Image (spheres, rainbow, N blue to C red):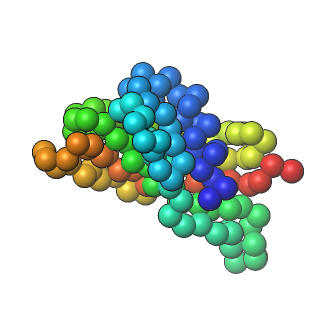
Amino acid sequence: MEALPIVRTILLAAAGVTAKRTGGIHLNVATQGDALPNAVLMSVGGGEGLSHEGADGLLHDRVRIWARAKTAKEADQLGTAIDKALHGYSGTVSGAAVQLVEKVLTTSDHDDKAEVQRSIIDVRIHWRRAP
């Protein structure tokens, strides 16, 4: 859960993501009536890292991102921009040291009858809390 604001901050700073979205980047659920395309971030797992020598001091969180839009094409374009912004990212975000963000999964949830189409991206973030 702690990694969600970190991922959100990275995405808000990414020009490619900003260019593909009209709505916000939300934690857990989109605000009702928010403009599309938008994104929703959810925590789907995590824990402390271990090595053969014991705890490695890193946290390893998995985050699922729904790139949501009115059309499948727009959802896919936003999803691609999110993937490009996150996969391989490392740096410092709000004092937290992000060692690596890596893509775990991409898929889509497109249905011609649905009002909202989704491109789904799962990432794993390896990070250390701010001191």
- Identify which residue, 27 or 87, lies in the foreground: 27
| Residue 27 point in image, percent of width and height | 54, 48
Of all residues shown, which one is farthest toward the front? 32
Can you see residue 80? no
Can you see residue 41? yes
Q: Which corner quadrant holds the N terminus?
A: bottom right
In this rendering, the answer to whether 81 lies above or below 110 is: above
Of all residues shown, which one is farthest toward the left? 112
| Residue 39 point in image, percent of width and height | 43, 41
Q: Is residue 113 left or right of residue 13?
A: left
- Identify which residue, 105 or 68, lies in the foreground: 68
| Residue 28 point in image, percent of width and height | 51, 53
Q: Is residue 62 left or right of residue 103?
A: right
Q: Is residue 85 left or right of residue 110?
A: right
Of all residues shown, which one is farthest toward the right? 131
Task: Give the number of callouts.
Answer: 0
| Residue 12 point in image, percent of width and height | 56, 31
Q: Which residue is drawn at 58% across and 54% down?
A: 125
- Identify which residue, 21 or 32, lies in the foreground: 32
Q: Which residue is drawn at 63% across and 45% down?
A: 5
Q: Which residue is drawn at 27% across and 43% down?
A: 116
